[in-house]
Amino acid sequence: MKKLNKKKMNPIKFEEVNVVFGENQPEYIPIPAFKVLNDENCEVVTCWKLTLTERLKLLFSGKLWVSNLTFNKPFSPVYMTVNKTDVLVVVDEDGMEIQKDPIWCRIYEKITGLKIPEYNKADYARSE
């Protein structure tokens, strides 16, 4: 397994993680992720921790560079944010949805033609 690079941003675990990509693959850094289990779009959310240098550079430049491998397939939509509620349905202890960002919902619906589904507890269950 590759070691995390302390001089670069790295993927980090978060409460909703239900899958780790690259696990048991020594050539890759494992990426903890949340994968919506019953989602036709196969939405996957990851969280990355920036180094202090990267945070300062981002603060002053306002630029974030992203590289995606497409394997000569159509480019998949990417959404980056600093707000967890923009990408995850956050629920309280009673299973009630706390808040989705309405701007991202409108953008998502416009791009995909799909409505953001209502919260369904079974879709967000952790896989064993």
Image: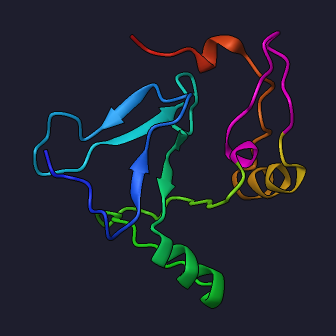
Q: Position of residue 96 (x, y in %)?
A: 85, 18
Indicate whether 1 appears above or below 50. Answer: above
Left of 62 or right of it: where is 35?
left
Q: Is residue 89 magenta?
A: yes
Residue at image point 51% right, 37% down? 42
Does 49 sit left or right of 40 as displayed? left
Between 82 and 109, the one nearer to me in the picture? 82
Asked where in the image residue 5 lies, by quadrant, the reply is bottom left
Which residue: 79% across, 54% down? 104
Q: In x, y percent, where is residue 95?
A: 79, 13
Tell me the magenta residue range: 84-99
The figure's colour scheme reads rainbow
Q: For the point 45% across and 25% down, which residue is it? A: 18
Spot the residue most to the bottom.
61
Residue 31, compared with residue 40, is above or below; it is: below
Question: Mostly what secondary structure, the magenta segment?
Answer: loop
Toward the front, the furthest residue is: 52
Q: Quadrant of residue 12?
A: top left
**Residue located at (84% from left, 48% from top):** 101
Q: Residue 46 in the image: x percent, y percent?
A: 49, 46
In the picture, which quadrant includes the C terminus?
Answer: top left
Q: Is residue 71 left or right of residue 116?
A: left
Among the 4 quarters of the image, the one containing residue 77: bottom right
